[in-house]
Amino acid sequence: MFAQKTIDFPSKDGLLITADYYEAKGSETFILLFHQAGWSRGEYKEIAPKLNALGYSCLAIDQRSGGEVNSVVNQTNQRAVAAGKKTKYLDAFQDIEAAVAYVKMTYMPKKIIIWGSSYSSSLVLKYTGDYPDNIDAAMAFSPGEYFGEDDFIKNSAAHIKVPTFITSAQNEQNKWLTINQAIPTTTKVSYVPATKGNHGSRALWEKFEDNDGYWSAVKEFLKSI
């Protein structure tokens, strides 16, 4: 078993963020895991231990825009609602910024990979373009232009310098094609399953028969970082 503990740290506006820390002893690369809409850090209960087994320490974060999944309540969202703070998708961008800063300061890993699911995968790509020298790779599960503008994420993606991985369900490819095309690097990778697939990081859950294809693509990408 790998160590897991729940921690809190402040977002940019002072709101406390809750996260689960999954430690892989001796890991030099850290993966930050962000969940999809209406959910929580519980999206990664099954995924994070498998990433530990591959040698990566992980931090699964509750963003302020979310709810509950896998019997894990989003505590950051509860605090935000109680404090009268906005909890729309874009309001969670500061939580991603704060999480990266926290991991850099607290754990000082040699490499940082940020990983998002659905709306947060778009914000992960935005972060990677807005702060092109801050992290070492980005992984986006079902990104899209979810913010009311056709080129909001695409404009940031045009400034990405590091390796990127994008995947989704089979019928979602058109949502991220132009974003992926805007990424100027030769180190970008995408995976579309031959099967129907699933939306977001849950595509890796064991209950879905086609999770193996996603895992193979993830492992291959991680090896290249």
Image: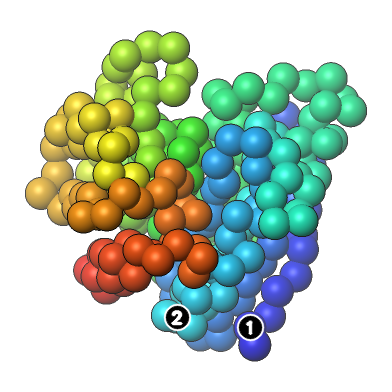
Q: Is residue 187 above or below residue 209?
A: above
The residue shown at (35%, 63%) is 210
Q: Position of residue 85 (x, y in %)?
A: 78, 21
Kindly identify the residue that appears in the image at 55 percent across and 48 percent down. 34
User: Which residue occupies the foreground of this view, 129 or 62?
Assistant: 62
Which color mode does the image show? Answer: rainbow
How far is mark 2 from mark 1, CA to CA? 11 Å
Q: Quadrant of the N terminus?
A: bottom right
* Amino acid type indicated by mark 1: Phe
- In this view, which residue lies farthest toward the right? 82
Label 1 belongs to which residue? 2
Give the mark nearest the N terminus, 2 or 1: 1
In the image, what residue occupies the spot 63% across and 83% down?
A: 2
In the image, taking residue 54 as reference, residue 67 lies left or right, namely right
Residue 44's image quarter?
Answer: bottom right
Say the numbered circle drawn on residue 55. Answer: 2
Image spot of residue 11 (x, y percent):
69, 38
Q: Tell me which amino acid carries mark 2.
A: Gly
**Position of the C terminus by quadrant:** bottom left
Residue at x 34% of width, y 70% of height: 212
Residue with the most extreme top position: 149
Neighbor class of circle 1 (other Cα within 10 Å; few <14, some 14-19, many 20+) is some
